[in-house]
Amino acid sequence: MTVVLALKCADGLVLAADSQITDSARGLSYPAQKLHPLGDTAAWGGSGARSVLVDVKELFETNPGALLGGGNLGRALQQQVVPVLRHHYAHFVSEVPGETGPAGTPATYVLIAGYTEDGVPFLADIDPHGLVGRYEEVGFHAIGSGAAMAQQAGALLAHFRMTERDVDHGVLAAVRVLDALRVTSPSIGGPVDVYRITADGARTLDPDDIERVRDRVRRWEELEDKLLDGLFDEPA
């Protein structure tokens, strides 16, 4: 199970993911990097077939300007990713003699977030059918087999209006959501990976940064708990 989520804040964007890969067919789980830089001012993550994501990574590393250079970002994303999908779909063997049970598929989602070279923020994805979604106005999106849980967690935090707060608040929300999902699902795990993105650049948080974020998340939770304790107190 994979969760890659992104949210848009008043002055930036956050992209975050777990780092556990589960291979159900082989009964294996192992860590893997799910987030990657996209030029200097964006980042991306993927869910689905690793072979497809490796090809997408090579494309994005070779020519990030094809996406960030302006123009129609959705069409540029399709022009980059759809040929990769078609190649893998064309060579997919759905039935293997002697093997039973469900097989993996080349179906893959890609989620990108950041700023174009013109300084315009974007939050978009492309699904296994090659359809592009744009989420700048919504301010939150998630992909992966755990996306439904992430969307629900995002909805529960909606009243905090992260789109109106700065990107550091967004980092807290992203880590809080992922840590909650790691508790509720054994298929979501490994170290949390986070990109903090502003118009000045995209920066990945190191383990020490993540621990400092968790300290602030704990303070956030303590303040919520304190407020709830006094919610029914009579006004002075």
Image: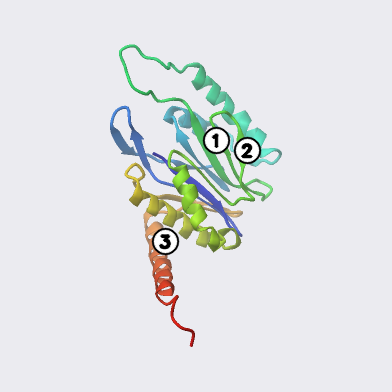
Q: Residue 195 appears at what percent x and percent y? A: 49, 51
Q: Residues within 10 Å of mark 2 (few under 14, many from 20)?
A: many
Disc 1 + disc 2, Cβ < 8 Å: yes
Helix, strand or loop at mark 2: helix
Three-letter code for the amino acid on which mark 2 is drawn: Leu
Say which mark, if any, is on residue 60.
1
Q: From the viewer's perspective, is 210 left or right of 66?
A: left
What secondary structure is found at the residue carrying circle 1? Answer: helix
Helix, strand or loop at label 3? It is: helix
For marks 1 and 3 on the same chain, the one whose residue lies earlier in the sequence: 1
Q: Which residue is mark 3?
A: 213
Q: Name the image quarter holding the N terminus.
A: top left
Answer yes or no: is residue 16 visible: no
Residue behind mark 2? 67
Closer to the camera in the image, 7 or 13:
7
Dot 2 or dot 3: first in sequence order is 2
Q: Earlier in the sequence, mark 1 or mark 2?
A: 1
Tell me what residue is drawn at x 46 percent, y 31 percent.
Answer: 54
Q: Residue furthest left?
A: 27
